[in-house]
Image (cartoon, helix red, strand yellow):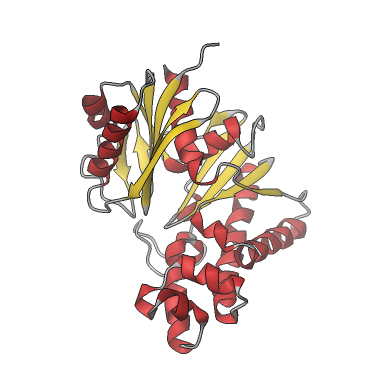
Amino acid sequence: MARRFAIGIDIGGTTTKAGVVTSEGEVLTRIERPTDPSAATKGAIALVDELLERSTETIAGLGVAAAGFITGSRVTFSPNLVFDDPQLGSAFEARSGLPVTVDNDANAAVWGEHRFGAARGIDNVAMVTIGTGIGSGFIIEGRLLRGASGAAGEIGHIVIDPAGPPCGCGLRGCLEQFASGQAVTTWARVAAEEDPSTSIVSFAGSIDAITAEHVGRAAREYDETARAVLRRAGRALGIGLSNIVNIFDPDVIVLGGSVTKAGEAFLGPARDELARMTAAQRRRPMRLDLSALQADAGILGAAALALDAT
């Protein structure tokens, strides 16, 4: 089969990444920019323009992965971003002249892992991406799960505490409010008020500047305040993963997203809580893997979906 090329673009809550991808899963040219939270479509189109100007390959299609609920090629709801033009399919097609495929960012990520990464060749896969928010994608018997309106499998918005903090989705106590980068940041700032000597503040420069990345750095230096914050978030994630096992019974759960870089201070409690809950139900041990594609999972998956459609 002849080598083919597509552009994959991944519009996330913090960054937008795009690349020219081969049908074998190689990223040839890659660019990344901060996402404009009030004009996510405009910023993403600018990245596609730049790639098309730089590329010498014949591009067969464009795959767009977006953080939100996708119906057809339109964003119908996004709790953490504003898409200035929610009609992504028509907006990107009008600008690029290419056939466009649009999907949820976590759907694209799990498809990338299924085709090229940690879940290659596995037909029942769950993927949870933990970044600014929490996304999830599911492959059931080799096919992406999308649901009747394209919004299936949003594990970040399952409620684990009805009395918990309000979520951008309109509910309270969603998993995203306990285990995402936003949650880690919020809890770390509260913890730093109580313990100003924590090295989280040293890494960030001030309490108001704290991010989840600073918490992860402090935890790797064995700062107990940072480790307590990540332990709390990891246990909440483990509860969410147990719900995934109960609903979908996958062969493997793949974890991705920037917060996983916090390492064992975050992942260990998640793994332990998942093991405790599955053992209590006498379920088989669940395989839990980290993304093999890391930040490129969405790019690769979006491009693969575009090539599949052309």
Q: Position of residue 215 (x, y in %)?
A: 51, 71
Which residue is at 36% across, 56% downward? 169
Q: Is residue 93 above or below residue 34?
A: above
Q: Is residue 307 visible?
A: yes
**Hey, which residue is sitting farthest top in the picture?**
1
Which residue is at 45% across, 83% downward? 192
Which residue is at 72% across, 49% downward? 286
Residue 220 lies left or right of residue 306; in this view the side is right
Q: Position of residue 268 (x, y in %)?
A: 67, 64
Q: Which picture quadrant has residue 238?
A: bottom right
Q: Is residue 146 visible?
A: no
Q: Is residue 235 above or below residue 80?
A: below
Q: Position of residue 253 (x, y in %)?
A: 63, 46
Which residue is at 47% across, 47% downward? 154
Q: Position of residue 9 (x, y in %)?
A: 38, 37
- Residue sitting nearer the eye, 232 or 30: 30
Screen quadrant of the N terminus: top right
Residue 220 lies left or right of residue 102; in this view the side is right
- Residue sitting nearer the eye, 244 or 93: 93
Count of picture labels: 0
